[in-house]
Image: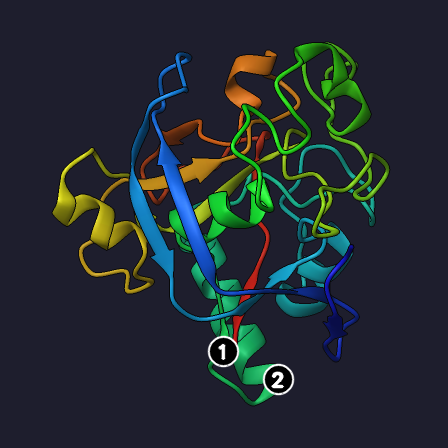
Amino acid sequence: MHAASIKNSIGMEFVLIPAGELRMDSNKYSYATPVDIVIIQKPFYLGKYLVTQKEWKSVMGNDPSCFEGDDRPVECVSWNDVQEFITKLNTKEGTDKYRLPTEAEWEYACRAGTTTRYSFGDADSKLGKYAWYYGNSEHETHPVGQKKPNLWGLYDMHGNVWEWCQNRSYGNSEDDLAYANTWEDVAVSSPALRGGGWVNYPKKCRSAYRITFHPNYGHYSLGFRLCRSL
């Protein structure tokens, strides 16, 4: 059952994600043993879709994307570019609620209550029904929302473009896991990306998989979706 949703002034749609508990799984392909339990203490809104080029242009007045199309995800945006977008959107909306999701929030929303490799199960053979990835993307991004959503009604959580998170990547220590669930961006040096992209094989599109890049780095497989605090 899909959760309640809201729209903002530029038409971005957000799905209400309930509070709950998450098993933060290992980044290794052998995923069966959880790293630890993380508590998502507060509900939050997460973008139903990746941020599109149309939405980016309505806030920023430009389009940095390599694969042009209003309904395609914006890409070639760095973490710092995204922070500028968020600042301008918050000003436009008269709020301070918009931000990137933390890694814990992202994985929790992606899994939608599941503990399998993907939000739909363990089978790589089903990935094409939910994601644009190396096996079906024809070497480009695609308009958002064309594949099946996860159980909470979120589209393209696997594939299409990698998604920037608010905080840095973390290890397995208790302190790192605690930081994974905060959204402050203090001393962010290597923000994490989640979900995999059109350039990737299935392994990198799994719910638990993460990579990091420099916050000034942009690439034609890097995009984002927005979080909105309650």
Q: Is residue 20 left or right of residue 68?
A: left
Q: Nearer the viewer, residue 148 or 122?
A: 122
Q: Tell me the element at label 2.
A: helix
In the displayed structure, would residue 117 be above or below residue 53? above
In the displayed structure, would residue 203 be above or below residue 152? above
Label 2 amino acid? Glu
Label 1 amino acid? Lys
Residue 48: give x, y in percent of width and height: 71, 56
Q: Which residue is mark 2?
A: 93
Q: Is residue 146 left or right of residue 27?
A: right
In the displayed structure, would residue 225 be above or below residue 132? below
Residue 97, numbered label: 1
Residue 38: give x, y in percent of width and height: 33, 50
Number of marks present in the image shown: 2
Between disc 2 and disc 1, the foreground one is 1
Q: Is residue 153 visible?
A: yes
Q: Residues within 10 Å of mark 1 (few under 14, many from 20)?
A: some
Q: Tell me the element at label 1.
A: loop
Residue at the extreme right of the image, as rendered: 146
Q: Nearer the viewer, residue 13 or 94?
A: 13
Q: Is residue 188 visible?
A: no
- What residue is at 56 percent from the left and 40 percent from the top? 111
Q: Quadrant of the N terminus?
A: bottom right
In the displayed structure, would residue 134 be above or below residue 155? above
- What residue is at 35 percent from the left and 33 percent from the top? 213
Quadrant of res 176: top left
Residue at the extreme bottom of the image, as rendered: 94
Residue 16: give x, y in percent of width and height: 64, 67
Q: Label 2 vs label 1: CA separation?
A: 9 Å
Q: Residues within 10 Å of mark 2 (few under 14, many from 20)?
A: few
Task: For the residues labelled 2 and 1, say whether their Cβ atoms are less than 8 Å apart.
Answer: yes
